[in-house]
Structures are given as structure tokens and as C-alpha cells.
Amino acid sequence: MNRNRILSLFWPEKWPSKKQWSKFFETLTGKEKFLFSFLIFVAFISLLLSLFVFYNSNTKEVPAYGGVYREGVIGLTSWININPVYESQGETEKDIIEIIFDGLMSYDKENNVVPNLIKDYQIEENKIFQITLRDDIYWSDGEKITADDVVYTIDTIVNPDFQSELMQQWIGVDVEKISESEVRFILESPSAVFLENLTVKIIPEHIFKGYSAQDFRYLKQNFIPVSSGAYKVKEVKEDNEGRIKSVVLEKNPHYFKEEPFIDEINFVFFENKNTLLEASKNGEVDGFVISDGSYSYFLDNDLTSNYYEINLPRYFSVIFNLRRDNLFKEIDIRKAIVFATNKNKIVNSVLSGKGDVISSPFLPTFYNFSTPETETSFNLERAKEIITEKGFIDGKRETEDVFVFSEDTKKDSQGEDVRMLQSCFINLRSEDSNLYPEGEVTGFFDEKTEETVIYFQEKYYEEILAPHNFDEGTGMVAEGTRKKLNELCADFFKETTDLEIVLTTLDNPMLVDTAEALKEQWEEAGFSVIIDYKDINSLREDVIRKRDFDVLLFGTMLTGTPNPLPLWHSTKVDHPGLNLSGYKNNEVDKLLEKIIAGEEDKENEKTLNNFLEEVQEVVVQELTCIPLYNPHLIYYLSEKVKDFEKTKLVTSSNRFQDIEKWYIKTKRVWK
């Protein structure tokens, strides 16, 4: 077949008639038929590709409605309390509350506090805060959200009968209804951080009003609540044993913002991390938080490409109880413990490297102010040197002359000298059974004590009586008698201090691993370490409330706006204050008060961050605690879930703060 022959097939000199077209294929050879069919196929594919390119160039992918998101939860339970008044719920309840309830204020993507249920607010001298509610906000049952709901919520929180853990942050705040849509908050003293209080979730008065405080926590309204967020509780599914297997959330038709894209949010409960991991691999869940202490378990099981590492304002530290007259009153001993602590090793072993070593309990990197310069990095040899310098040998230190007889005492005297006299006689009784037989330490110089003094004086006649020309004992403890008592009893009055640390902490996997790591490190330096594990109730009621600990390994959650006053001010040393170490410093108090009031020193060009840095420098230097690490929130999320981009959050539950924008389905629309 020549070239002209081929060209004539497509560009003939005379266009064929309809009849000729019908005979077209009959005129072609086999090779010509194949070539022609191939060229037609190529032309068709080219047309399709052109149309596809044109469509994609002139359209864009956007979120579409539909789909179900499933959040995995570890731990089976028969009851959940979905009520924002209570903060001590499990993380699952907090997550659900974040999704189904709204606050007056909320956090934006940069974690700034912004209006949510309110359309406007005014502030007077950081003491009076007046808000105006939006006109288009409703509860999920269709009732309008009003000022009555706001006042009722705060009144419930501050009423001690309801035992709300949020009460502390509302002390000193009066709330007044101005109109159906206006509420005024009046503070006892100025607060530059009060707006963050208004992120509290509001509850409906018409649902809860009239119930007693005793019944409030266990109402069925806390199980399937009337709410105000993007979703509401549709149903709670249980297994045959009455345990919750899932909580199903559906769209709230009365939500005032845009309609959420995802149709349902399901919280699915699993017995343990093994079953959760298996469900994740099988595609039965779309997301879950990898709990502290389980990082390596999940990250070593093919989930490494589908997780987010998020920074939270929380940290774990070793807190010294400075109110007790014990070993840890000595700053050098505290410094030795710091030098003996290898924080990097703990972060790598306990957190699988998913956390930051910290040197300050103020988390300056989270809040964007300067990190303090410290000289307390891990240095085992320096720790041992300090221990030796402080007089400890083989874990013990003896202090002589803790008590010396220096006052005359006689019959009817009473007090510490008499107590020590009686104690001395009891200790000497092991060598002489006639000395103070059956005597007791009472602190009162009675006849039995007098008889023993006489016996003692006559026993050591040459040293006590003869120099003063006495023939018999006088019964009075004077200079000669005191000298002999001090000689014989000095060993009894030596104070022996053990280089021992009793470390109290919560019995949970991450803190157990951390405590064991600390024990190993501190014992290598020469300390003897006892770990006292507590369950959550014991820790809260017996340890925290009563401040009954020497050294405490504990976690602290900070707020979105820097507010160190509750943790370090001297007025917060007792429960329900959060100054667990009992730290007191007048200068620090003054700086903290300036920070909370929002005062800036314009004359000296000092900002609030400058004040924070000054407080931080003092607290860090005085070693009230050992800041250890800031663990990251590890959140596994399926690739099918779109529009989740978080690197920093105020709380773990805040990952759902804009869940109405998440989507699973997509569609294309013309640009």
C-alpha cells in the first residue's frame, strides 16, 4: 500500500456517496481495516482525554454531604455522663460534649478565643464582661437558647452541692441576666483571661431545672442530652451485658452554623487496645487517640503514615511538697535529684520520642515567650557530688547536737527538756535496769523522775556531786548533771536522715513507666526510692486534696491563655487551689497579680510576656518542681477523612472544635 493510497482513504478527491460508504470496508484489505480501526480508537480516546482534561481544568473538587465517621474508644462501660457541668468525665465524654454542646466563646484555628453563641461583648476594665447572645441559636429540641440558660449553667457550677469541678474558676464571679439575650459577669478583681471562662458549654435550663443536686449527676438527660452543637445524640447502643458498644450522633437540625458534611459520628467502644487495633486494620474505625503510654504499641503496627502529632499545653513533673519539714526542704537535695534525672531517656523510652523535654512548667514554647536558661541538665556525677557534700554516707546522714540539755529542771517542771530527760533515761535503761523503771515520757517532772535523777546523780557521784561538795543526790538537773547527761545521751539525740524518696503517682501505664524510670535513675545516684501508686479517687481525695505527699509525679493541664496564678500564687496552696508544692513568694505573687489583671508596665516597656518570663525565672531557679516532658497528642485518622489540620490545641477534645467542616464524600463543581 503506497502513501497516496492511504491518504486517499481520508482525503479523497471526490466525497463518496451514501451507497459507496456502505461498501467502504469491502474495499479495504485486512491490513487497511486494522489500521483504520486503530486510528478511530485513538481518535476516540483522544477525544475522551480532551474532555476529561477540559472538565478537570474547569471544575474543582468540593466537600459533599454524606458518610459516617467512626471514632474508636478503649474501655467498656455501662454509663456515660454527657453533661458539661462535670469536668472529671472520661475523655470520651469530653469528646462527645465538644461535638454536641457549644460555648459562649470558642477557639479558632490559632487557638484564639472568639465569639460563638454570642454576637457581641463589651469589657470594662477587665472586671465587667457583658455579652449579647445571637438571635439564631436553638437547642436540639427546638427551644431558643436564652440568658436564662447561661445564668442557670453558671449558678449550677458555683453551687457546691452539685460538686462541679469547674467551680474553682468561677469563684468571685457574679452573673446577672440583663434581658433575654444579655448577660453580665462581674468579677471581684480584674482578669485578663476571663474570656476563656466563657468557652464553658451551656446546658438547657428547661431540661434540668427543678432536679436536686443529689439526682443531677445521674439523670437520664445526661445520657441522651438536649444539646446545642453541630450534632446531637441519636442513640446509645448496648451489648447483651448492658455495656455501651456505641454512641451514635446525628446532625442537629437546629444548629445555627452551616450544616455538617458528615451524616453520622459514631463512638465505638472496644474492650482493649488489641481489639481496637484489629478493628482499625479491618477498616471498622476511622480514628482514635493513641493514649499516653501506648505510643509504641500502635505506631509499631503499620499506623505510622496515618496519624497527627499535636501539641497540647500540658506537662508532667515531679512536685516537691515544700510545706513539709523534710529532706526536700534543702534546695541542694532537690538540685541533686534534678541532676540525676535523664529526661531525654524518659521521653524516648516512655513516649517513644513523641514528646518534648521541658525545663519550665510555664511551657514558654507553646505560648511563644522565652525559654529559661538553666544549669540543671542530666549530670549523674554532679548529683553524687552534691549528695556527698551534704554529708550523706551510704544513704544516711547523722546530725549531732540536735538536742542539748541547757536548762535547770526540777520537780514540777515541764516541757521539752523534761521530755528529753525522760527519753534519755529510757534509752540508758538497757544498760541499767534500775534507771527509771517503768518510766514514761510525759514531759512532766514527777516524783518518779526525781527519784531517777537522784539515782543517776549518786551513780555518777564523782563527776556530778563530789565537785560541788554534795553527799547525796539533789533531784535537780543542774550544770553537773546536765554535763553528764549530754555526754551519755548525745548518741540518742543524733538525727539520722535517710536519703529516701517516697514518690506518689497515679497507677496508669505512662506514669508507672515514668516512675520506674525515675526510680532507676535516682537510685543510681544514691537515693533509695519507694513508689506509692494510687488509684484516681485516692490520688484526688487523699493526696491532692489533703496535700499528703512528699514527692508527687503528676500531670498539669494549662489553659489557652497563659494564667500561672492558680499554680503558683500563695493564696492557692490549699484545696481547691492548684499550688500543690505550697510555694510562697511575695514578689512572684505581685507579678502574678499583674499578669492576671492584664497590667503592662508601659513606663519600663514591660509586656505581659516580660512578667511571665520574670515569674518563670524565679520559680525555675527555686526548683519547686522538676518539669519532665510535654507528651504529644497522637491522633490516628483515616485518609478518607478530610479537612483536619491541627498541630496545636488547647485540649484533646478541641480536635472536634470544627467537626462540621470535616468531610468524607466529595463532588466536582464548575469553577
Image (cartoon, grey):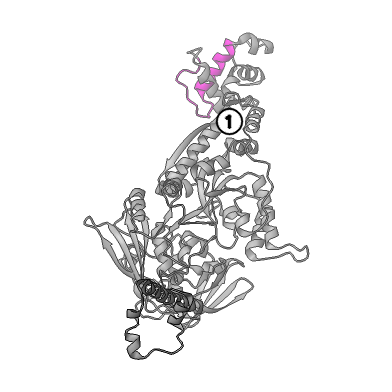
What residue sits 65% from the left and 50% below the top? Answer: 585
> For residue 295: magenta?
no
Q: Which residue of the protein is positioned furthest toward the left in this rendering?
A: 240
Residue receiving disc 1: 525
Q: Is residue 9 above or below residue 358?
A: below
Q: Is residue 414 above or below residue 200?
A: above
Between 303 and 34, which is closer to the camera in this rendering? 34
Q: Which residue of the protein is positioned furthest toward the right in this rendering?
A: 603
Q: Is residue 420 left or right of residue 23?
A: right
Between 381 and 671, which is closer to the camera in this rendering? 671
Q: Position of residue 300 (x, y in %)?
A: 44, 46
The quadrant where residue 8 appears: bottom left
Q: Is residue 539 left or right of residue 27?
A: right
- The magenta stretch spans which residues? 435-459
Q: Residues within 10 Å of mark 1 (few under 14, many from 20)?
A: many
Q: Is residue 21 above or below residue 50?
A: below
Q: Position of residue 95 (x, y in %)?
A: 42, 62
What residue sits 43% from the left and 44% below the top? Answer: 509
The quadrant where residue 665 appears: bottom left
Total labels: the figure holds 1
Q: Is residue 606 above or below residue 358?
A: below
Between 418 and 315, which is closer to the camera in this rendering? 315
Q: Position of residue 79 (x, y in %)?
A: 31, 59
Q: Position of residue 97 (x, y in %)?
A: 41, 65
Disc 1 is placed on an element classified as helix
Q: Quadrant of the N terminus?
A: bottom left
Residue 451 visible in the current orientation: no
